[in-house]
Amino acid sequence: MLESWIAFKSGGIMMLPLSLLAVLALAILLEKSWLYLTKVKLSAQLADLLESYEFNMQELNRLLLQEQSGNFFRQFFSTVADNAERPVWWLESRAADEAQMIEHRLSRRLWLLETTVTAAPLLGLMGTIAGMMHAFNLIGANGLVNPSGVTGGVAQALIATATGLLIALVSLFGFNFFARLQAQTLDDMERLGTRLIDRIRLGKGEGHETA
């Protein structure tokens, strides 16, 4: 712990904004992890039912009620099922609106992670420049006047650079991971939502057309 604090102090003034970015990125990663663990779950039983050619809408409603109230898949499929008696064009419009709202919830604050990927290395570079300038200022006309000071300036440059790169790497992996989860979630909703709308159309005698 003491060594970490010494390294933090040695990194110079740029460690403050870098620490802020690190805390921000960590908070977003934890929030997204909690979101996908609690609200983005598709039970195998519900998926299998929707994948079947023809199923009972009462069974669908029963399975939807078993999902948590805040589950995004429950919200989406319930919106479609609740509007089953309305015209198909209205049904498709409501499904698209609900999917758009869910996409907005899933992508919220992800742009901050993407920004951190770019900003952290740049802040680290600024720390590098500050550290090297400090080291060069200790070299006078008669040569090196403070060897320990030069060493401290180089250490500041290296610590700031390494910290910025570490924050950027963690943010990059986190952003790509959750962006992929978001795309997969929306793909599953679109695919299974099409199955559900096809089932409703079949029940209305409109034929099995692709929504």
Image: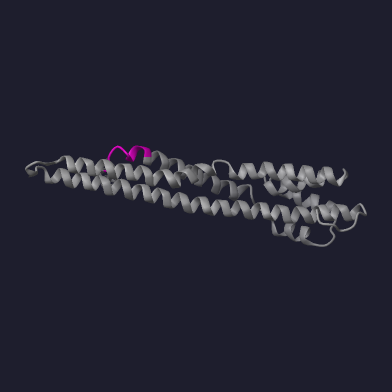
Q: Residue at x 76, y 45 (%)?
A: 95
Q: Residue at x 54, y 41 (%)?
A: 109
Range covered by the magenta-colored residues: 11-17
Height in image: 28 above or below 63? above
**In front: 88, or 72?**
88
Q: Tell me if I can see residue 5 in this picture.
A: no
Q: How is the image coloured?
A: one colour
Return the x and y of residue 209 as percentages of the image width and height. Answer: 85, 57
Return the x and y of residue 137 as percentages of the image width and height. Answer: 17, 39
Return the x and y of residue 130 as percentages of the image width and height. Answer: 26, 40
Q: Residue at x 33, y 40 (%)?
A: 15
Q: Tell me if I can see residue 81 in this picture.
A: yes
Q: Which residue is at the far right?
A: 205
**In front: 165, or 193?**
165
Q: Is residue 36 magenta?
A: no
| Residue 116 as seen in the image, left or right of residue 189 | left
| Residue 168 as seen in the image, left or right of residue 28 | left
